[in-house]
């Protein structure tokens, strides 16, 4: 594969957050070289032109934020969302929330800790796509859904001020809409958080 095709490859995938061996094979197929995919990938890895996220998953973007796309459908939430909405300034692992049947917990990707959490399909709502670094869009939980997810995963934040920050910034009408899709036991947890920390209470 000549430098010309490598240049075309990089141009094609430069804004694709994550791609697979199959994607590379399909790309090479247009040049009649689909059986060359594995060797092509190995050559790119040796020249540090390609980052392997895990077996069969790759990226050209040296940014841990791309990691969520390995677990599509997914969205970023919890600590990642709280940082995005300026509700706290703690350094925490990237939090990926997915409905995929994958192992939950901390895993190492690109030399960094990433926290993958599974959520019930019925709770897969309350996120929007936001621009990231002018490269692509990422699915991010709304602040209202982040509050619900804190209750869903039964996570305590410790610092009361963080809850107050959330409750001051959320759209309470939007929260009410999302609560209609939320199971009763989770809804009660959210209501308790509001009761305990809302300055409006």
Image: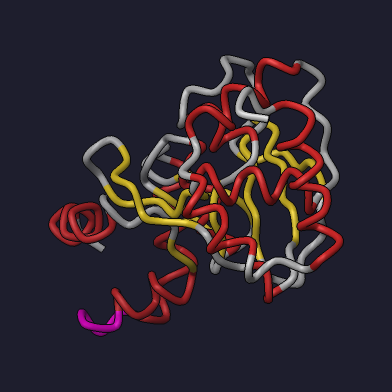
Q: Can you say which quadrant of the picture contains the C terminus?
A: top right
In magenta stretch: residue 87? no
Query: Mainly helix, strand or loop, the magenta region?
Result: loop
Residue 148 x/y as whole percent: 68, 50
State whether residue 25 is above or below residue 71. Answer: below
Q: Can you say which quadrant of the picture contains the N terminus?
A: bottom left
Residue 9 x/y as whole percent: 24, 59
Of residue 76 and residue 105, the one placed in the foreground of this image is 76
State whether residue 106 is above or below residue 116. Answer: above
Of residue 18 and residue 43, the one placed in the foreground of this image is 18
Residue 45 placement, left or right of 61: right
Question: Quick one: which residue is furthest to the front in this view?
Answer: 201
Q: Is residue 189 visible to us here?
A: yes
Residue 6 placement, left or right of 104: left
Residue 137 placement, left or right of 92: left
Q: Residue at x 32, y 40 (%)?
A: 132
Q: Which range of residues does the magenta coloring cover?
A: 29-33
Q: Residue at x 50, y 38 (%)?
A: 170
Of residue 55 and residue 33, the one placed in the foreground of this image is 55
């Amino acid at each position: 594969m000549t430098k010309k095709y490598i240049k075309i490859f990089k141009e094609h995938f430069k804004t694709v957050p994550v791609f697979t061996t199959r994607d590379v094979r399909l790309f090479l197929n247009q040049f009649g070289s689909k059986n060359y995919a594995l060797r092509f990938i190995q050559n790119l890895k040796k020249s540090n032109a390609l980052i392997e996220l895990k077996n069969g998953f790759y990226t050209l973007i040296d940014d841990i934020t791309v990691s969520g796309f390995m677990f599509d459908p997914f969205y970023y939430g919890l600590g990642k969302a709280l940082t995005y909405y300026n509700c706290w300034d703690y350094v925490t692992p990237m939090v990926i929330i997915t409905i995929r049947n994958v192992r939950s917990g901390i895993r190492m990707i690109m030399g960094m800790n990433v926290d993958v959490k599974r959520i019930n399909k019925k709770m897969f709502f309350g996120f929007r796509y936001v621009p990231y670094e002018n490269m692509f869009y990422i699915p991010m939980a709304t602040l209202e859904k982040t509050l619900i997810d804190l209750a869903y995963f039964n996570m305590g934040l410790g610092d009361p001020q963080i809850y107050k920050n959330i409750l001051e910034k959320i759209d309470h009408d939007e929260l009410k809409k999302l609560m209609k899709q939320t199971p009763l036991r989770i809804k009660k947890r959210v209501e308790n958080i509001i009761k305990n920390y809302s300055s409006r209470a």
